Amino acid sequence: MPWETALRVALALLFVGAWHLVFGWLWNRVAAVRRGRRAPSRWPGRLLTLLKHGFLFLCAVGVTVLLANFYVYHGFGHQPDIYRRGDPARPWVALTFDDGPSPQYTPRILEILEKHGVPATFFMVGAHVEAYPDIAAAVVEAGHEVGNHTYSHINVPTASTQRLYEEMLGTTAVILEVTGQYPRYVRPPRGLYDGRFRRMAALLGQEVVLWNRSSFDWQGSLSPQAIVRRIVNEARPGDILLFHDSGALIGREGGNREATVQALEGIILGVRAKGLEFVPLSQLLHGVEGEADPPFNLVE
């Protein structure tokens, strides 16, 4: 493991540990107040200590996950270079698919999109483009847009700088070589990015596009009906919708995306019934800033 990656992992663990200490301090403060109001515990002291620290650790992990989720969907500070949605004043939404191409699911998705005349953007993993070049080329031939999703679906914040740059550059090169289309967009795996990722995207001329409405199809446990209900009920003008045509919970492929394929037609019909239309990202984001100016100056 490169030293830079080890350092980033260590910092992540320290972050969780810091929250553990904070919750431990709060626990002790509350316990000190309540100590004189209750009878002595019948539980063995060591067991109580183990349960206490187990609970505090879960609290620390939970807060870390919540902050990471907020970071993906909202970010911290002003981020004009990151797009999470389009203009809510226009009745448009955009379909995006991550982690492909896949020989099992991508061709079937393309058939459904063609049947209903729906454009989409496919954020491709470079290794999958190399493994399935005909499918990657078919996406562009069908008129869809493509984006960079790194070469091997890395975890951006813990990757070394050299590895990150190689992943982004390599994927850009292989997509251009195989499809003939330069990827205008880039999306970090799991939505986790950092300043290095944003700077490299700017150098490559690729817009960082996240999402504001996830299908949660990556969970693998949702039925097609549940995915349809979630997207159709929650879809709003300007939404960037997130789906997956490959990938896995652990690893870059092998996950079951059958529910996504089966849900797609119902989603298209349901969203259109609400008066919304599917457009390419290039149209959805046209004239839109990555993030509106804040009401006051923020120190970067």
Image: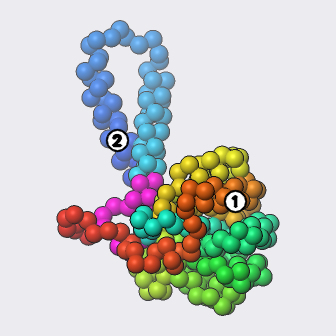
Say which residue appears at 68% left-offset and 87% top-offset.
179
Q: In the figure, is residue 184 to the left or right of 129?
A: left
Disc 1: CA contacts within 10 A as few (<14), some (14-19) or many (>=20):
some
Residue sticking out furthest to the top: 39
In what element is the residue under mark 2? Answer: helix
Q: Which residue matches tag 2?
A: 21
Say if the magenta span includes residue 18: no
Say which residue appears at 26% left-offset and 13% top-offset.
36
Q: How many marks?
A: 2
Q: Which residue matches tag 1?
A: 264
Say which residue appears at 57% left-offset and 83% top-offset.
183
Q: Which residues are magenta?
A: 69-82
- What's under tag 1, amino acid-wise? Leu
Q: Position of residue 191 (x, y in %)?
A: 50, 63
Image quadrant where residue 128 sits: bottom right
Disc 2: CA contacts within 10 A as few (<14), some (14-19) or many (>=20):
some
Q: Position of residue 289 (x, y in %)?
A: 37, 74
Query: Does residue 198 sit above or below 262 in this rendering?
Result: below
In what element is the residue under mark 1? Answer: helix
Residue sticking out furthest to the left: 296
Task: Report the front residue among 246 and 112.
Answer: 112
Quadrant in the picture for the C terminus: bottom left
Say which residue appears at 39% left-offset and 59% top-offset.
74
